[in-house]
Amino acid sequence: MADESTSDSETFAGALRRALDHRGLTLTAVHALLADHGNPISIATLSYWRSGQRRPEAAASLSAVDDLEQILGLDPGSLSSLVNPTARLGVQPEPLVPFEERARRETEETFAALAAAAQADIREISTHMTAYTHRDGSVDRTEFVSVVQVVRGVVTELPLIDVAPEETDAMSRILDVVGGRLVREYRHPGRLVSGIVIELDEPATAGSTFTLQFTEQLPRDYPNRRSAWHATARPTKETLIRVVFPEGADPDWCEEYVESDTGDEVWAQRAVVHGRIAHAMRHGFGPGVLGIRWGGS
């Protein structure tokens, strides 16, 4: 049932009724148009949605809502943002920036300078990152593939933060973005933290997921980084970090480590390099930092 404490203008049912009235479409006509889009939602279900007796829940229903926005000439997210995702998402903890005090402060200032979307609107589902090193052991580039879920509202862009090993004027380059495009970047005056914003190819609404793929290339004048890490502000289903070393350039030592949401190291152990690759993997990890570091070659 619709929430009686919510005004009709704020509900999915209210927005759907107004759009149907504005277009002068019957439920029979909408049913036929949805079927043409590959979403054969029954007239009875559409009637329930219009009256507020039910809301879209299943994946097929949520897909139909996206088609409804097109059929009714609405902006993306106009209806889907009003579908309450709480039951599907569960209770979401507040995001925590998992760095020590200075990096945490400069990260928050960088988010503000980028006019970035609120981290409270999203959560990571999974991140796979692969770092490739030079023969001297320093990181050359890192490839990322992330699946992100929208917790509330409509998300059109994603901010990303980099914390350098030491203060520097050099800044990594973002290449080969798939699923979006780089629109803004910022280097904090403290010269330790930098950030970028990737605009998504399509808006993503509450309860939905999107995927981003990109490469971070470190310039040769970037501080020598012999670590690969990923920070998450909320628990994430899967985090995978891989480090690939050149043939014959295995490090003298390699270890996996974890930092808490305050930036304090809480755990470290030796990591084994198998066939030039070291990896660390966690399920349900966060908030915090998971990483691999190494030395010698």
Image (tube, rainbow, N blue to C red):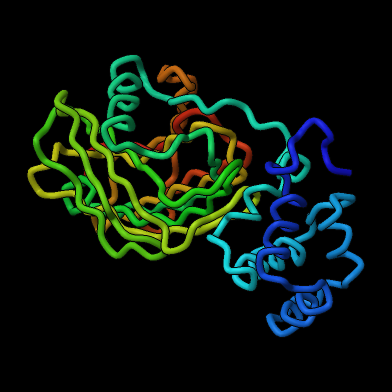
Q: In this orientation, does residue 262 appear?
A: yes
* Residue in the foreground of this view, choosing between 236 and 206: 206
Residue 53 pos. (x, y %)? 89, 50
Q: Is residue 294 visible?
A: no
Where is residue 44, by image quadrant?
Answer: bottom right
Quadrant of the frame with the C terminus: top left
Is 165 rendered above or below residue 180? above
* Count of numbered marks: 0
Q: Residue at x 14, y 37 (%)?
A: 223
Tell me which residue sits at (65%, 32%) in the image. Answer: 92
Q: Is residue 138 left or right of residue 109?
A: left
Q: Quadrant of residue 144?
A: bottom left
| 17 left or right of 217 in image | right
Q: Nearer the viewer, residue 105 or 229?
A: 105
The residue sitting at the bottom extreme is 36
Residue found 54% across the figure and 55% down from its top = 204
Side of 193 where 19 appears, left or right: right
Spot occupied by residue 189 in the image (x, y as percentages of width and height): 14, 26
In front of the other: 41 or 222: 41
Residue depicted at x 33% and y 52%: 131
Quarter the N terminus occupies? top right
Does 104 sit above or below residue 129? above
Q: Could you say which is closer to the camera, residue 197 or residue 12?
A: 12
Extreme residue toward the top, this view? 101
x then y, percent, for residue 18: 70, 57
Q: Is residue 150 above or below residue 264?
A: below
